[in-house]
Amino acid sequence: MPGEEELALGAIASGGTRVLNRDLIGHLQVSEQLLDEITAREERELKRREGLYREGRPPVVVQGRTVVLVDDGLATGASMLAAARTLRAAGTGRIIIAVPVAARETCDDFRGEADEIICLKTPHPFGAVGIWYEDFSQITDDEVRELIKEAQPHLTE
């Protein structure tokens, strides 16, 4: 949401996956025009990051494999849902979602989207993911690139 970047109206993922939180969009009275503008901006950012992070490498083959999706926490779960649906469409064998903290309702909602969900804490009231961390600073593009570089030898085709 413009002005509240941590408030997810939805999420997008590679391959055209788009997940929208229609209840929140309706409550905030977000117009379709604004939603399309936000989506276009986020698609440009997704393409930028994919190019920067992949450095010309193709996506990792996930067909028939077990994939563990890890996030710092689930509030609305929009980004995790987009990731899980994209992987399902790519033919992933099993999807396991692992998070340290999540809203109880969101965690429950994923039971139909993943083969397994591991969530260490579902506090009530939940609030936001960031309140459950002492340090919730964002990771930089350079840090992501370094982590991918370290992981490369462990990725198999």
Image (cartoon, rainbow, N blue to C red):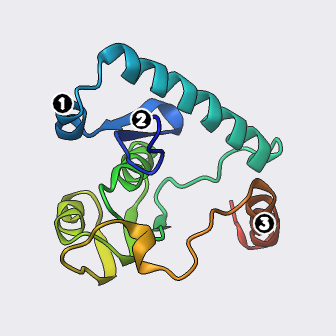
Which element type, helix, strand or loop, lies under badge 2? strand
Q: CA distance from mark 2 to mark 1?
A: 21 Å
- The residue where tag 1 is placed is 26
Q: CA distance from mark 3 to mark 1?
A: 42 Å
Under mark 3, the amino acid is Gln
- The residue where tag 2 is placed is 17
Under mark 2, the amino acid is Thr
Of all residues shown, which one is farthest toward the front?
3
Instruction: Give me the disc on residue 152.
Output: 3
Mark toward the viewer: 2 or 3? 2
Q: Is residue 90 left or right of residue 152?
A: left
Q: Position of residue 114 (x, y in %)?
A: 29, 63
Q: Badge 2: how crowded within 10 Å, few (<14), some, or many (20+)?
A: some
Q: Position of residue 130 (x, y in %)?
A: 45, 69
Of all residues shown, which one is farthest toward the top?
33
Which element type, helix, strand or loop, lies under badge 3? helix
Q: Nearer the viewer, residue 87 or 136?
A: 136
Q: Badge 1: how crowded within 10 Å, few (<14), some, or many (20+)?
A: few
Is 32 above or below relative to 148?
above
Which element type, helix, strand or loop, lies under badge 1? helix
Under mark 1, the amino acid is Gly
Q: Position of residue 102 (x, y in %)?
A: 31, 72
